[in-house]
Image (cartoon, rainbow, N blue to C red):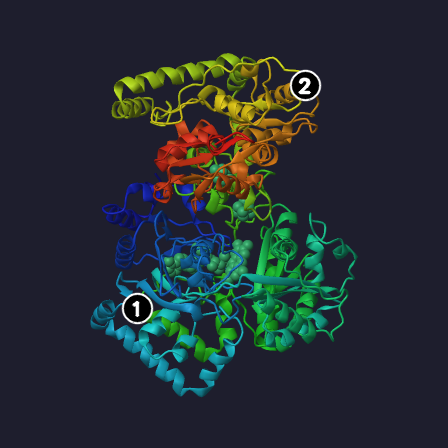
């Protein structure tokens, strides 16, 4: 789609690479290229072609063909860059599925990583060795190794000592002409020297030239004393003799302009287990900054400065200390953290740190806490600053975060000068925070780019900022976010002519055709920073505050198959933008068509993205609202009918499943798979796809009359999924239906189990809500709430839901008098004292559903499982299973993609346990072990108190 609209030379390029790269991974559709082309910066370019690459050979092919046709190429990792360095108007190469291999070696002193691994995943791998990677950007939960390295990203603690430049051991690189070199591999080095000796000689010559120029040498040393990501890592030329080491270190911070990093080896750093933090409030920014040179001499891990505007932006948020509201207009905070291997050393460090700054006046006495809950609140203040501005900005405006660094001794006056500039240019909401220990200050403000006068205001403001940073203080214009397009026009001004000339020569050595990310780092256009500005039109109130940071992407089940939450929002914004511009209805219809499958149909609407979003957006809510808009009056009529006559629907599903199960029994799995696949193809994907884990329908649930003399009562609500499909799949060894199992477990604990009369008519409404039938959903939850209230004696008796997503919805919609529980919390609160547990000698897996995670019960699920089984596996990198009620039958590709990698992690487990029947179907299918409710495990591991084993 869209290929015909490409210039002919790009059509030829696409044809050439199509011989190797599958068509589905080459994207030219006009809407999709906008969507995949967007990063977190305030710049926008629309690529002509987006390619999801699977391996190094594909990158080589693309680079060779691009070099032959003179096509610019940009690489993309997590797309969280802020300076416009991961966008392209030509070819955008995204790391698709794969790129996730790693190897820990040298006693965990080193880790080899492919570039698609998310930074925090690398740290999770190293956690068991009390190690981590050095770089620690605040975006580490979303940014990938390729981007972290190519930006030389850093954060609150790593400073200039543990960033990628300092901790990189070796790289495997694909150069602009497709050549691959592994700087740690002797064979590869020898081959490279033979074929590309010219590059090595040129690097050595540059080094000799720099070493011979004392002024240049000391300029380079001086510039890297503080954090600096403006321009190339010129320190590589003076720090290393070996041309391969120079090459490796030049790649760090090169923002995809010198080559593609296909593998990296990091030296790991220690992760101290003991931590303590203090939020120290100083009367003004000057006093706070006076503490910095002193703290630099102490063994502190971080010292984050937050100005009054920053504190004000979060002071009303939940959990913030009340005194924040009472501070004077000049108050400034330093958030200081110390770390140690053992508690005694930590206490010593706390004492020394406190004593060292005791002579400086503070508003409150300095108080460190080593309680994770307490210091977690402090760090929440710090992490909430950028989003706080993003969340309150006017729709249509952009939130900008700048990233400058000053020599430590100038920090106080520089901060005051910045505040004066905000006043001069009327950036009244601007706030300052940053890694003061490294002289690095961020300032955040909002900007309207839809008016020429506003663009001029931004331009003039930035000119003054550049003068302030460069001329007055000789600081860095970009300390950690990378030069990008944003500071490219000012690199020469910051570094001077001689150093800039060096940078141009470096670029020419590696990329003589200037095809790798042109315009980034080096740009002759002095206005480049105010061109290609990203439009952020209003599209829907649920998502208008989105800052397109991409933090929501890693948890989304459809991320590798269609869109991520950010892409769903970007797609909607693009449609709204084109509509506002008066684009013809044919074009709009075509955009809407392009959006339907990746945007609307394949969203699981589970809302897990909301748990990662710094401004609290649940993109699933947008999609449900769009589904509601699209529901015709006929569809609504049908939904009304289903809602009003729920009993026969649930029964029909149950009976159908029983029939299908009998057929499966007779014809076998292979034939069933074939027939169902054919039927689905013939119906153009409209028929749901059968799979071998389809359960039987449940037996009818008996509603027993109340027994007056049992004081221990529980109301049990089997969800409609458990009622309709609570039976076992054909290969399942547990043959009891979920409702029967739950009832017998509750009775074992001594409960009398109450089940609502007319149980077959009730539903929490979730199935309606996810399809956008809100009216019908609310009606069903009201009916259920009324029935439960009645049966529980106005909330006196606890209510157990056997399915977490149903409970989650009811928590928001039921009468607040009800005490409702899902299985994990119910067992932990109500059954642990009534049953005796014997840990089973088995290895099992657990899967917290999205609702379990949203309710913060994932750790509790693990805790409960550990009480029941010897070994418990919580698979890494598996979040939402993507089954989403019945969507897993209609769009099974989402479920399959979301659970890629599950089988390998759970293959040695006997079974898996969760709290939602439909999720368990998909988990069993892709995990290749039976998944069932955690209640089965609790039942197997427990007996009534006092009963003999
Ligand atoms: C809210 C927020 C907070 C942030 N906080 C910080 C912070 O504290 N510190 C910080 O340093 N940054 C921060 N950033 C910026 C950004 O997240 C980091 O710089 C991050 O390292 C970028 O990684 P990425 O995977 O998103 O890379 P991308 O944005 O995809 O790419 C970054 C650059 O690397 C290049 N690239 C990607 N993969 C490769 C490859 N395999 N080979 C060669 N080049 C490649 C791209 O072309 C691009 O130039 C923040 C961003 C946001 C949105
Ligand atoms: S939805 Fe939230 S997390 Fe996702 S891109 Fe937008 S602001 Fe970032
Ligand atoms: S609701 Fe789920 S599937 Fe939809 S965008 Fe959010 S995480 Fe992705």
Residue 350, how many percent across, how many down?
A: 64, 69
* Circle 1 SS class: loop
Using the image, tell me which numbered label, if any, was put on residue 183.
1
In front: mark 1 or mark 2?
2
Q: Residue at x 68, y 75 (%)?
A: 356
N-term mark: 1 or 2: 1
Tell me the quarter of the image containing the N terminus.
top left
Above or below, comparing residue 689 to residue 342 in the picture: above
Residue 439 visible in image: no
Mark number displayed over residue 820: none
What's the mark number on residue 790? 2
Q: Nearer the viewer, residue 270 or 13?
A: 270
Residue 309 drawn at (x, y percent) = 70, 59
Label 2: few (<14), some (14–19) or many (≥20) C-alpha neighbours in 10 Å: some
Question: In what element is the residue under mark 2?
Answer: helix
Q: Position of residue 581 (x, y in %)?
A: 53, 41
In space, the residues marked 1 and 2 are separated at their CA atoms by 72 Å
* Vertical comparison of 384 with 663: above or below: below
Where residue 925 sits: x, y (%)? Answer: 36, 33
Q: In the rendered image, which quarter is residue 204 located in?
A: bottom left
Instruction: Please indicate, yes or no, whether residue 879 appears anywhere in the rendered image.
Output: yes
Residue drawn 31% across and 23% down? 676
Q: Which residue lies at the image location 51% right of the left edge and 19% below the top edge? A: 635
């Amino acid at each position: 789609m869209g290929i015909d609209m490409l210039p002919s030379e790009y059509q030829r390029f696409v044809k050439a690479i199509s011989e190797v790269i599958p068509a589905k991974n080459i994207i030219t559709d006009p809407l999709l290229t906008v969507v995949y082309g967007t990063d977190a910066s305030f710049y926008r370019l629309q690529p002509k072609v987006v390619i999801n690459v699977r391996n190094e050979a594909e990158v080589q092919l693309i680079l060779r063909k691009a070099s032959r046709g003179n096509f610019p190429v940009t690489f993309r990792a997590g797309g969280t860059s802020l300076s416009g360095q991961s966008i392209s108007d030509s070819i955008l190469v995204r790391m698709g599925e794969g790129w996730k291999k790693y190897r820990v070696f040298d006693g965990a002193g080193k880790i080899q990583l492919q570039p698609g691994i998310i930074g925090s995943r690398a740290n999770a791998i190293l956690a068991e060795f009390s190690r981590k990677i050095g770089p620690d950007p605040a975006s580490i939960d979303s940014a990938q190794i390729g981007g972290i390295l190519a930006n030389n990203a850093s954060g609150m603690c790593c400073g200039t000592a543990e960033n990628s430049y300092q901790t990189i051991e070796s790289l495997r690189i694909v150069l602009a002409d497709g050549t691959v070199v592994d700087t740690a591999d002797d064979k590869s080095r020898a081959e490279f020297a033979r074929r590309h000796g010219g590059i090595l000689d040129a690097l050595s010559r540059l080094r000799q030239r720099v070493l011979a120029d004392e002024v240049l040498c000391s300029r380079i040393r001086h510039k890297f004393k503080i954090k600096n990501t403006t321009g190339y890592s010129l320190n590589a030329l003076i720090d290393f003799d070996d041309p391969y080491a120079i090459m490796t270190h030049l790649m760090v911070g090169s923002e995809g302009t010198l080559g593609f990093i296909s593998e990296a080896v990091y030296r790991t750093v220690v992760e101290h287990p003991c931590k303590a933090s203090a939020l120290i409030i100083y009367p003004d920014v000057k006093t706070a900054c006076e503490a910095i040179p002193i703290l630099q001499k102490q063994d502190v891990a971080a010292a984050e400065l937050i100005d009054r505007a920053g504190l004000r932006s979060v002071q009303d948020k939940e959990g913030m200390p009340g005194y924040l509201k009472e501070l004077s207009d000049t108050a400034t905070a330093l958030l200081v953290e110390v770390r140690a291997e053992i508690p005694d050393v930590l206490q010593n460090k706390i004492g020394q740190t406190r004593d060292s700054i005791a002579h400086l006046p503070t508003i409150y006495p300095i108080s460190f806490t080593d309680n994770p809950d307490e210091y977690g609140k402090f760090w929440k203040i710090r992490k909430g600053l950028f989003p706080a501005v993003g969340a309150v900005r006017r729709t249509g405006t952009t939130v900008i975060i700048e990233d400058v660094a000053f020599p430590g001794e100038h920090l106080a006056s520089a901060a005051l000068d910045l505040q004066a500039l905000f006043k001069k240019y009327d950036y009244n909401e601007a706030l300052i925070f940053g890694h003061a220990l490294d002289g690095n200050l961020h300032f955040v403000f909002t900007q309207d780019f839809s008016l020429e006068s506003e663009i001029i205001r931004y331009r003039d403001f930035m000119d003054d900022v550049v003068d302030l940073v460069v001329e007055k203080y000789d600081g860095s214009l970009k300390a950690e976010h990378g030069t990008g397009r944003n500071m490219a026009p000012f690199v020469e001004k910051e570094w001077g002519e001689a150093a800039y000339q060096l940078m141009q020569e470096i670029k020419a050595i590696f990329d003589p055709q200037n095809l790798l990310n042109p315009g980034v780092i080096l740009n002759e256009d002095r206005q480049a920073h105010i061109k290609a500005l990203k439009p952020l039109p209003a599209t829907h109130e649920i998502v208008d505050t989105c800052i397109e940071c991409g933090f929501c992407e890693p948890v989304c089940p459809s991320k590798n198959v269609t869109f991520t939450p950010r892409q769903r929002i970007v797609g909607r914004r693009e449609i709204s933008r084109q509509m506002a511009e008066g684009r013809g209805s044919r074009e709009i219809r075509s955009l809407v068509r392009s959006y339907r499958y990746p945007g609307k149909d394949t969203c699981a609407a589970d809302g897990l993205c909301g748990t990662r979003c710094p401004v609290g957006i649940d993109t699933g809510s947008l999609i449900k609202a769009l589904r509601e808009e699209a529901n015709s009056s006929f569809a609504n009529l049908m939904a009304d009918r289903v809602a009003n006559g729920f009993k026969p629907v649930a029964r029909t599903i149950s009976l159908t499943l029983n029939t299908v199960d009998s057929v499966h029994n007779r014809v076998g799995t292979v034939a069933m798979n074939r027939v169902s696949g054919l039927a689905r193809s013939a119906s153009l994907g409209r028929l749901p796809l059968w799979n071998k884990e389809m359960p039987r329908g449940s037996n009818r649930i008996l509603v027993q009359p109340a027994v007056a003399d049992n004081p221990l009562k529980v109301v049990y609500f089997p969800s409609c999924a458990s009622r309709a499909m609570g039976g076992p799949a054909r290969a399942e060894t547990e043959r009891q239906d979920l409702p029967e199992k739950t009832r017998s477990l509750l009775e074992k604990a001594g409960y009398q189990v109450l089940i609502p009369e007319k149980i077959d008519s009730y539903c929490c409404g979730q199935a309606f809500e996810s399809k956008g039938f809100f009216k019908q959903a609310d009606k069903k939850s009201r009916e259920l709430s009324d029935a439960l209230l009645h049966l529980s004696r106005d909330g006196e008796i606890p209510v157990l839901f056997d399915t977490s997503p149903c409970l989650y919805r009811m928590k928001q919609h039921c009468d607040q008098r009800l005490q409702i529980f899902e299985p994990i919390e119910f067992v932990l609160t109500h059954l642990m004292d009534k049953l005796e547990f014997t840990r089973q000698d088995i290895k099992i897996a657990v899967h917290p559903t999205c609702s379990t995670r949203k309710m913060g019960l994932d750790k509790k699920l693990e805790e409960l499982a550990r009480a029941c089984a010897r070994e418990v596996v919580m698979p890494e990198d598996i979040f939402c299973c993507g089954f989403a009620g019945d969507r897993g039958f209609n769009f099974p590709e989402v479920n399959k993609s979301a659970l890629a990698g599950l089988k390998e992690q759970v293959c040695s487990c006997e079974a898996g346990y969760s709290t939602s029947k439909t999720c368990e179907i998909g988990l069993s299918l892709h995990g290749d072990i039976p998944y069932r409710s955690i209640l089965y495990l609790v039942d197997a591991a427990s007996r009534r108190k006092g009963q003999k084993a």
